[in-house]
Image (spheres, grey):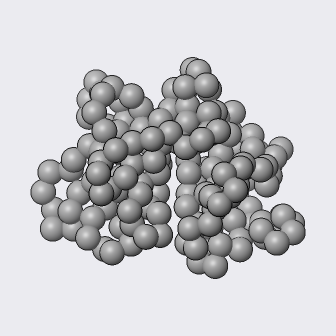
Amino acid sequence: MAHWSPDGQQIAFSGATPGKPWKVYLISKEGGSPQPVTQGDVRETDPTWSPDGNTLAFAQVDPFQADKTFIVLFNLRDHQTSQLQRSHGIFAPRWSPDGRYMLAISSDNGKLLLYDVTNQKWRPVGSNLGAFGYISLSRDSAVRSSRGSTTPCLHQRRSDSETD
């Protein structure tokens, strides 16, 4: 899925060319050639913008080795990447609109996890809910949603983690 930058100037998306792994690209709103955010032949998916637009988070994914799946942070100012601490075996990041949290999925697709950016800690917010598909957070970051093949639609409140 493609995502507009908070300032509306560019779009981040995942794509693949024949014979190459999926990569995360940026393209200007004016068009032109998409530019990969990293070099190398590793699978990258699920880009998400930080609310301030300075960082792009995405997953580096190895479908066969969970310990080689993790979340990458790409700094748009200096074009440097870093690995999000304690994110091994986690993919599909989604930044909350307030920037305080990141929502993601465990590599076995069995747990929904919430990362507290300030405390730099993950906690499970849902498990045994079926396979997760597209995940998102409400504008006030209070409700998490997931749409998947075995979970048609899940809504969970951050305040009490109740699911409906």
Q: Quadrant of residue 147?
A: bottom right
Q: In this view of the protein, can residue 18 be seen by the observer?
A: yes
User: x, y percentage for residue 52?
Assistant: 43, 70
Query: Is 30 displayed left or right of 129 in the figure?
Result: left
Residue 60 versus residue 100 in the image, above or below? above
Residue in the foreground of this view, choosing between 89 and 81 = 81
Residue in the foreground of this view, choosing between 144 and 57 = 57
Give the residue drawn at x 55%, y 25%.
Answer: 68
Give the residue drawn at x 56%, y 51%.
Answer: 93
Give the residue drawn at x 27%, y 65%.
Answer: 10
Q: In this view of the protein, can residue 3 be seen by the observer?
A: no
Name the residue furthest top.
64
Name the residue furthest left.
32
Query: Is 44 displayed left or right of 111 in the figure?
Result: left
Residue in the foreground of this view, choosing between 88 and 10 = 88
User: x, y percentage for residue 95?
Assistant: 55, 61
Q: Quadrant of residue 156?
A: bottom right
Q: Which quadrant would the N terminus be assigned to in this image?
A: bottom left
User: x, y percentage for residue 81?
Assistant: 39, 42
The mark tally for this picture is 0
Q: Which quadrant would the C terminus be assigned to in this image?
A: bottom right
Give the residue drawn at x 33%, y 75%.
Answer: 7
User: x, y percentage for residue 160?
Assistant: 87, 69
